[in-house]
Image: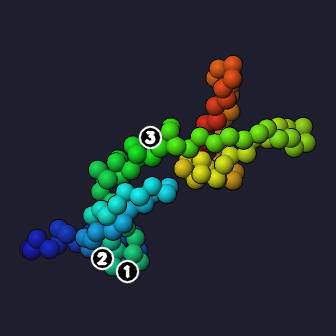
Amino acid sequence: MTSEAALDVRCRCGGRLKKSVTEVEFFGIDFGMKEAEVCTECGSEYLSQELMEEVESEVKKRGLFGLERRGRVAKSGNSLVIRIPQEIAKSLRIKRDLPVVIYPSEPKKLVIEVGD
Ligand SMILES: [Zn+2]
């Protein structure tokens, strides 16, 4: 038994993973060059738990301070329509047909919860 067997982690596609340094970018935020495991077959990148947490907290921070957009209420039939800017849709992974719950939380605040 060799130590190599323990490192024999495979990608979803069945390809082998090898350690590599790759440029990490999420939602247009550049996290610089980071260590990741990259599939030698399909190129899928697997990031460490710590890095994913760093990415998540940074995205949350940017979400609060960098993603505010202004818009205007429109009308479609009997409903009022508020467009969701692309950057916000992208950062929250809002896609067509995704279920939402919408409710007023304060006199001038509307909350939209996305996903199940
Ligand atoms: Zn793969």
Specify few, some or many for label 2: CA neighbours under 10 Å numbering under 14, 14-19, or 20 or more. Answer: some
Of the numbered discs 3 and 2, the one sitting upstream in the chain is 2
Confirm or deny contact between disc 1 and disc 2 (CB under 8 A). yes
For residue 61, the mark is: 3
Q: Which amino acid does label 1 sit on?
A: Glu
Which residue is labeled 1 in the image?
41
Ligand 1: does it lie within 8 Å of the C-beta at label 1?
yes
- The residue positioned 68% from the left and 46% from the top of the image is 84
Measured Cα–Cα span from mark 3 to mark 2:
35 Å
Specify few, some or many for label 3: CA neighbours under 10 Å numbering under 14, 14-19, or 20 or more. Answer: few
- The residue positioned 69% from the left and 51% from the top of the image is 97
Q: Position of residue 107 (x, y in %)?
A: 69, 19
Specify few, some or many for label 1: CA neighbours under 10 Å numbering under 14, 14-19, or 20 or more. Answer: few
- The residue positioned 64% from the left and 35% from the top of the image is 112
Q: Is residue 14 visible?
A: no
Q: Where is residue 57 in the image (x, y as percent from the top left)?
A: 39, 43
Mark 3 or mark 2: which is in front? 3
Horizontal side of 39 relative to 81 (left or right) equals left
For residue 16, the mark is: 2
Mark 2 residue element: loop
Instruction: Farthest residue to the left: give it.
Output: 1
Of the numbered discs 1 and 2, the one sitting upstream in the chain is 2
For residue 102, the mark is: none
Mark 1 residue element: loop
- The residue positioned 39% from the left and 75% from the top of the image is 43
Q: Which amino acid does label 2 sit on?
A: Arg
Confirm or deny contact between disc 3 and disc 2 (CB under 8 A). no
Q: What residue type is labelled 3?
A: Lys
